[in-house]
Amino acid sequence: MIRLEHLQIGYGHCVIAHNDKEIACAKGKFITLIGANGTGKSTLLRAISNNQHLIKGAVYINNTNINNISDLDKSKSIAVVLTNREFSQFLTVEEILYLSRAPYTNFIGKLTPSDIAIVEEIMTDFEILKMRSRRLSTLSDGQLQRVLIARALVQDTPYIVMDEPTSHLDVHHKAEILLKLRDYCHQHQKCIIFSSHELSIALALADEVLAIHDLKLTHQSKAEFVATGMLSKMFPSPLLDFKDGKLGLRFKQSKSTEL
Amino acid sequence: MKNKVLFLLIIAVIVLFIADICLGTVFIKPHKIWDVLIGANNSASENYIITQMRLPRAVMAILTGAGLAIAGLLMQTLFRNPLAGPFVLGISSGAGLGVALVVMGSAVLGISAVSGLGLVTASVIGSILVMMLIILMSLRIKDTMGLLIVGLMVGSLSSAIVGILSYFSSSEQLKRYVFWSLGSLGNLEWSDILILTVILLISSLLVIVILKPLNAMLLGETYARSLGINIKSTRWIIIIITSLLAGSITAFAGPIAFIGLAVPHLARLLLPTVNHKILIPTAVLLGASLLLACDIISQLPFSNYSLPINAMTSLLGAPLVIWLILRKRNLHF
């Protein structure tokens, strides 16, 4: 269980999001993190995964303050999907997956048969077997994102934090990957927290919602979140219409068309 | 494929090593080398040429080539930058500044003659000082790109001081400094070579310790940390290895250009892989054979002339890298 206690995140003394109580993210939950641009979604994910940008409060994993967990132990409990592209483009798909077994390999990084089996399984599940020996520089943005999601799963951690993992995918693959992730999350009792701007799909699939609005971080079940009608407050726009968590477009004729 | 490349490179190093000893102003037949080593050769001049001149020179070429290749590769991985080399941290500039201060500043200080040993000492002190400055900086600067820029600034700062010094120095002193900066693998004692061998061995052991972190660094620092890699200590070890290697090599052989930058790229494209477990031995062998080849050519065999090694490495290396970029269209780290 990941627990966020009296959390205040931000930069310097400037708090950009806070929650005065306690937020608990349990295993087996598929949790979406939503908020408008610049509200601190990435900052929150970095606070959870890396203990960065915490002004007050603390992050606990299984009742241990994340501050007191060694890098190695943390690497066995939280995996991340980042938006940065700092990795070597010369790596092949299977190389980046094999390297992500680092928390479990010996000091020289030798792979055991079970490491290889896990990588094979995930490559099959995420349909990237065909591109296994391609260099990352030759992949499209969408393919690369699939590889990066698979990379996090290869790390085999109970908690996975993903910063906009599907932003470059087309709408079909967005739905496909998120559905697959949800099933994986339920089947293997993982806790996945992912930020997304794809409200319709994210809300359709998520079990719980973390939302940042008006400097406040809230955590609710999906049904609660939809019932509060928060969405129209978070994204105030004359063009948008949120009904039961579904996104619609409003035209001048005031006819509502569902997307 | 990988084993084949490594095997061919080992053969290349052996062949070039023997050729480097045989070729020179006078040609010495290969079998004579063995005779000299077991003491069965009666010609005193051949004995002298081999044991005091050509053998130390060829060993030096191997050590220098291997050391600079390791240093360059580590820098490129640390800075995630294909342009990084062992000298980007300003280590060779520090060495150059040390030498310039001794050679050209000695007149100002009133000291007339400076020995060869004084030159080496000055160069080592210069590189260590810059290395300590960089380490101090790295305590404050969390970002490796910032460190890269600091290194470049230290480099231009020292070349500015060298520029001022050379402006005020006599032509004799200037000549001496220029000769050092052209680089030379010769004129070294066996004790110097022993020092360099020990440094190379220590560095190799340290490299084995950070093999796994080095490969994880290929994912970028944030991902590497999320994989449980201690970035801070890895960065420190890389800086220490590079300073030791580049500092001592520059002290003994002058600022040898290009090997550190070019060899890692050649190794990556030859294999091709970025896995350090394969890349490091390849770069070591490639660096050694490239510098042996450069040394053979710079000796201009069968003539009474020789060229500076630093000119040779760039003359040979620059077209090679340009050709590779034209063929592959891009370079990665």
Image: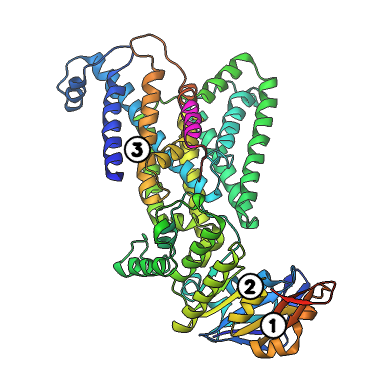
For label 2, the crowd category at 10 Å Cα-Cα, with few meaning under 14, some 14 to 19 and many 20 or more, is many
Residue A14 or residue B309, whichever sits in front: A14
Comparing labels 2 and 3, the label whose residue is closer to the camera: 2
Per the image, label 2 sits on a secondary structure element best described as strand
Residue B326 on the magenta span: yes
Q: Amino acid at mark 1?
A: Gly
Q: Chain of mark 1?
A: A
Q: Amino acid at mark 2?
A: Ser
Q: CA distance from mark 1 to mark 3?
A: 63 Å
The residue indicated by pointer 3 is: B285
Left or right: A118 in relation to A195: left
Would you identify the image quadrant in which residue B66 lies?
top left
Upstream in sequence: badge 2 or badge 1: 2
What secondary structure is the stretch in magenta mostly built from?
helix
Q: Which range is magenta? A: B317-328
The residue indicated by pointer 1 is: A245
Circle on res. A96: none
Q: Is residue B58 above or below residue B332?
A: above
Q: Position of residue A131 (x, y in %)?
A: 42, 56
The residue indicated by pointer 2 is: A195
Residue at coordinates 80% horizontally, 80% vertically from top-left? A233
Disc 1 and disc 3 on one polypeptide chain: no
Mark yes or no: residue A65 visible: yes
Residue at coordinates 59% horizontally, 35% vertically from top-left? B93
Q: CA distance from mark 2 to mark 1?
A: 16 Å
Q: Amino acid at mark 3?
A: Leu
Q: Is residue A208 above or below residue B142?
A: below
Q: Position of residue A176 (x, y in %)?
A: 52, 71
